């Protein structure tokens, strides 16, 4: 996996890299025994010469921060981690009082729930085609189920030795530790394991945050275009949801309503367009939220798959005021059926979120959590990510070759730096509906961006997801599409 290092300018490159690695080790973000990227890979990632990274590693080795193992690589030396802070347990037994139902009253839901649509407005896959460019779906066939089976067997052995008791509502300690280490290494988000709450996916985390921060009628902001389930979640919490447009730098902070209580953003890889939020815009958003006492939900989906450019600082790593709730999920790195996500909230929200999780369902499946912890801590997760990164990079390159080649007369791609989907605007006279319908007649699954827009009237565009479509199917489908579009345009 890439290690998060920020290089500014071209001055003192080795010094910048050295200081950040040393700080990561001393602060405990890089735990003892952690394997670092090779000097060649690190140089490629940062866009510097290999001599620069060699100099850094040699200095850290000589000072005892790193250790080299012949044939295995370079590792963080043991015994240098920051001592974990001790915190009293948040697990408390809560007594619940039940109200006797009124037999004379008819059982009715709130009007909001009567009007809520049953299904999400997210695109649905084509059941009968392997040439489907649906977004947000991973290639489950590539998952290392043999390694996962070993982890599940380990979890079964652990559970067989334990007592049948209710567990910590924040999640299993081993998984929270694995997540905190992963975020520190991969995203420069510093946290102790005790800061992490395990959820049933990112949507569950959004629901918990909305329930503990919003009152009926509060204003909550979403991006436009944006993620429909987030809009639905905030609406269900009783909020008045206001869509705010995005541009090439992400959410337009100057258009935020002054009395907003919560802002939901996807700064690393805007959904669905794909551009990252600029650093200037991130700082502006943090300042805006701090001045108004608003909460920011940072959904860092797809952050693992970055294909070009340097990584941008997560809002969470820039937050000094305790206003960012950092949300992630394993749905895009493993598969959605796992139903495991997490939130690293501000310290002031941990207690309320813990209680909300405990009241809602107490805790998730401990067997899955224990297996996932083993999968992460023994290195299987990192190996899987590295393999999938190469696979998705090849698919992305094939998609771009077509969009810039035989499909160039009809599409204008919005090339993202990360993620497993790409948006592309349609050129006149093509329309979303016409292209989608024509493609489906040829057993090609295409999906328009219209369902993701709330107020903004944008040019017709499509989402090309390449997470669950093989590279040869991408080639064949887009070659066929290139033959269909000229007839459609006429």
Image: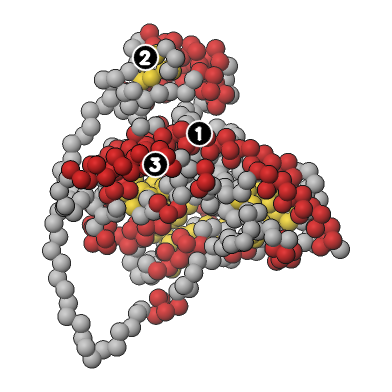
Residue at (23, 32) in percent of width and height: 84
| Residue 57 pos. (x, y %) | 44, 14
Task: Examine the image and state in which quarter residue 203 appears.
Answer: bottom left
In this orientation, does residue 280 appear?
no
Relative to the observer, which residue lies in front, 344 or 117? 117
Judging by the rendered image, the residue that carries numbered circle 2 is 67
**Side (left or right) of 294 relative to 127:** left
| Residue 468 pos. (x, y %) | 57, 49
Q: Name the element at disc 2.
A: strand
| Residue 2 pos. (x, y %) | 48, 30
Residue at (31, 23) in percent of width and height: 32
Q: Are marks 2 and 3 in contact (CB under 8 Å)?
A: no
Separation (CA) of disc 1 from disc 2: 23 Å
**Disc 2 residue crowd, few under 14, some 14–19, many 20+, Cα 10 Å:** many
Q: Nearer the viewer, mark 1 or mark 3?
A: 3
Relative to the observer, which residue lies in front, 49 or 117? 117
Q: Nearer the viewer, mark 2 or mark 3?
A: 3
Relative to the observer, which residue lies in front, 284 or 391? 391
Separation (CA) of disc 2 from disc 3: 30 Å
**Disc 3 residue crowd, few under 14, some 14–19, many 20+, Cα 10 Å:** some
**Side (left or right) of 59 relative to 252:** left
Q: Name the element at disc 3.
A: helix
| Residue 184 pos. (x, y %) | 38, 34
Q: Earlier in the sequence, mark 1 or mark 2?
A: 2
Q: Name the element at disc 1.
A: helix
- Where does the C terminus fall, quadrant-wise? bottom right
Q: Earlier in the sequence, mark 1 or mark 3?
A: 3
> Height in image: 418 above or below 118?
above
The image's mark for residue 386 is: 1
Q: Earlier in the sequence, mark 2 or mark 3?
A: 2
**Disc 1 residue crowd, few under 14, some 14–19, many 20+, Cα 10 Å:** some
The image's mark for residue 148 is: 3
């Amino acid at each position: 996996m890439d290690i998060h290092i920020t290089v500014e300018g071209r001055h003192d490159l080795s010094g910048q890299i050295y200081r950040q690695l040393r700080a990561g080790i001393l602060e405990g973000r890089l735990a003892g025994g952690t394997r670092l990227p090779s000097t060649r890979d690190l140089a490629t990632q940062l866009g510097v010469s290999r001599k620069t990274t060699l100099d850094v590693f040699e200095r850290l080795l000589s000072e005892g921060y790193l250790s080299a193992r012949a044939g295995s690589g370079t590792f963080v030396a043991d015994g240098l981690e920051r001592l974990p802070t001790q915190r009293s347990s948040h697990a408390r037994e809560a007594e619940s009082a039940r109200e006797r139902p009124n037999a004379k009253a008819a059982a009715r839901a709130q009007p909001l729930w009567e009007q809520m649509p049953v299904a999400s407005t997210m695109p649905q896959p084509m059941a009968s085609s392997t040439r489907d460019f649906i977004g947000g779906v991973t290639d489950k066939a590539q998952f290392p189920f043999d390694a996962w089976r070993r982890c599940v067997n380990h979890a079964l052995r652990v559970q067989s030795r334990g007592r049948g008791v209710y567990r910590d509502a924040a999640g299993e300690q081993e998984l929270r530790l694995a997540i905190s280490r992963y975020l520190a290494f991969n995203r420069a988000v510093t946290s102790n394991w005790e800061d992490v709450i395990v959820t049933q996916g990112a949507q569950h985390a959004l629901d918990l945050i909305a329930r503990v921060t919003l009152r009926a009628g509060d204003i909550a902001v979403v991006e436009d275009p944006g993620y429909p389930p987030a809009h639905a979640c905030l609406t269900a919490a009783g909020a008045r949801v206001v869509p705010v447009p995005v541009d090439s730098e992400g959410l337009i902070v100057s258009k935020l309503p002054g009395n907003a209580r919560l802002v939901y953003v996807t700064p690393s890889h805007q959904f669905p367009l794909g551009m990252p939020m600029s650093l200037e815009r991130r700082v502006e958003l943090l300042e805006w939220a701090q001045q108004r006492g608003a909460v920011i939900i940072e959904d860092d989906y797809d952050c693992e798959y970055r294909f070009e450019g340097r990584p941008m600082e997560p809002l969470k790593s820039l937050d000094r005021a305790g206003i960012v709730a950092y949300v992630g999920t394993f749905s895009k790195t493993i598969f959605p059926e796992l139903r495991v996500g997490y939130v690293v909230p501000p310290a002031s929200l941990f207690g309320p979120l813990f209680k909300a999780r405990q009241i809602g369902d107490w805790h998730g499946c401990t067997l899955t959590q224990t297996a996932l912890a083993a999968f992460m801590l023994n290195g299987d997760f990192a190996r899987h990510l590295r393999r999938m990164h190469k696979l998705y990079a090849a698919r992305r390159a094939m998609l771009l070759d077509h969009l810039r080649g035989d499909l160039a007369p009809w599409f204008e791609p919005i090339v993202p730096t990360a993620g497993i989907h790409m948006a592309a605007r349609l050129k006149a006279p093509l329309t979303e509906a016409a292209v989608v319908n024509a493609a489906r007649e040829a057993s090609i699954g295409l999906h328009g961006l219209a369902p993701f827009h709330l107020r903004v009237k944008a040019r017709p565009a499509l989402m090309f997801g390449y997470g669950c479509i093989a590279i040869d199917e991408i080639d064949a489908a887009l070659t066929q599409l290139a033959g269909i579009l000229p007839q459609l345009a006429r």
